[in-house]
Image (cartoon, rainbow, N blue to C red):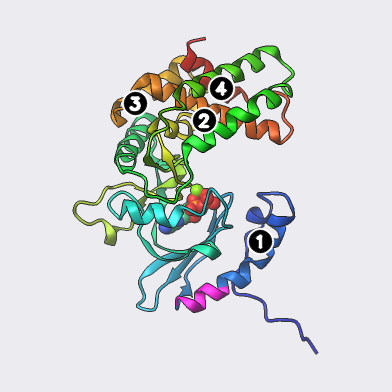
Amino acid sequence: MDFSRPQSQVQVPAALTASQNGDAWRVWTAALPTLAEEFLARWSLRLDGPPAHGAVALVLPVLQADGSPAVLKLQPVDEETHGEPLALRVWGTRHAVELLNCAPDSGAMLLERLDATRTLATVPDGTAALEHLSGLLAHLVAVPAPAGLRLLADIAQAMLDRVPTYCRSLADSSERRLLATCAAAVRELLDEPGARLLHWDLHYDNVLAPLPSAQVSGRAPWLAIDPKPLAGDPGFELLPALRNRWDDVIGTADVSRAVRHRFHLMTEVVCLDRERAAGWTLGRVLQNCLWDIEDGAVTLQPEQTAIAHALLGS
Ligand SMILES: Nc1ncnc2c1ncn2[C@@H]1O[C@H](COP(=O)(O)OP(=O)(O)O)[C@@H](O)[C@H]1O
Ligand SMILES: [Mg+2]
């Protein structure tokens, strides 16, 4: 006789399980089918197709009780993800996906279903895609941050505190100098950290088109999903798009020029002061480099150094 529990109708994609290491991740992904079943029942949802995922979230296409399409997004609650429902609520539906329901303590959200086959990554012309993304960013960062989000001021200070120790891990003295230069740029901006609502992860795969039925008048043609929000200066928003389609940058004769072209386009459309935006972008480079060093790296990623050198003109 088989006393095992009936198999869940929710299958966690192997690629999601393998996307991160560590015990906490193993425990989280092992519990995902049960969590999904709980919210399918609680919010009266039926599965409606194969799951999607990114590096962190499981996203299940579902039908609501009235038959309308939506997705159930499940992700671990941490300092990056916990503000997502709040940011979506503050932005509203004009430039972002609609939040239909949420259980913030469980990392569960019911979201409007968008057209996952139409992301900015599918727009063939790189400049056109960057213009769309920058136009969207201009609207998102025009909004003041609500209370309750993490602050760029705190993130920047925590980075600066770690720089002296982390720098020593780098094998190459020119890389140590570069990291110190990024830190100096951030230090100069520390007394004006900004207070706008930032998305932090606006790259092409996080910008989707609405379904035809949701393309209503006054709504933008491209919508943001997946914010890891914080309160800060919009200059801290540019790096994900500067790195997008990096092969296109590498494929040009002059990598620095290609990076600066993207930077100029974005700062123009978003109406940012270039000097401040360059400083905060060096801050994002610093953030990525510190994470890499934390993970054991003793050299910096070439794309990070290329972006820093392009902005520093070095
Ligand atoms: N509202 C939505 N409608 C349709 N597909 C979605 C929606 N939200 C997310 N997805 C799909 O799920 C994937 C992962 O979701 P995302 O919110 O970006 O999480 P992650 O933090 O893991 O990247 C997306 O790349 C997209 O394909
Ligand atoms: Mg994503």
Residue 179: horizontal and vertical position, in percent? Answer: 60, 20
Quarter of the view holding residue 265 = top left
Instruction: Report the magenta stretch's main SS.
Output: helix
Closer to the camera: disc 4 or disc 3?
4
Tag 3 and tag 2, C-beta contact below 8 Å:
no
The answer to whether residue 173 is visible is yes
Q: Which mark is residue 135?
A: none
Disc 2 element = helix
Give the amino acid type for the residue marked by disc 1 in the picture.
Trp
Q: Give the amino acid type for the residue marked by disc 3 in the picture.
A: Thr
Q: Which residue is mark 4?
A: 183
Mark 1 lies on residue: 28
Distance, label 3 to label 2, CA atoms, is: 16 Å
Q: Considering depth in this image, is 166 or 206 the residue closer to the camera?
A: 166
Q: Residue furthest left?
A: 217
**Residue at the spot of label 3:** 267
Disc 1 and disc 3: Cα gap in Å? 39 Å
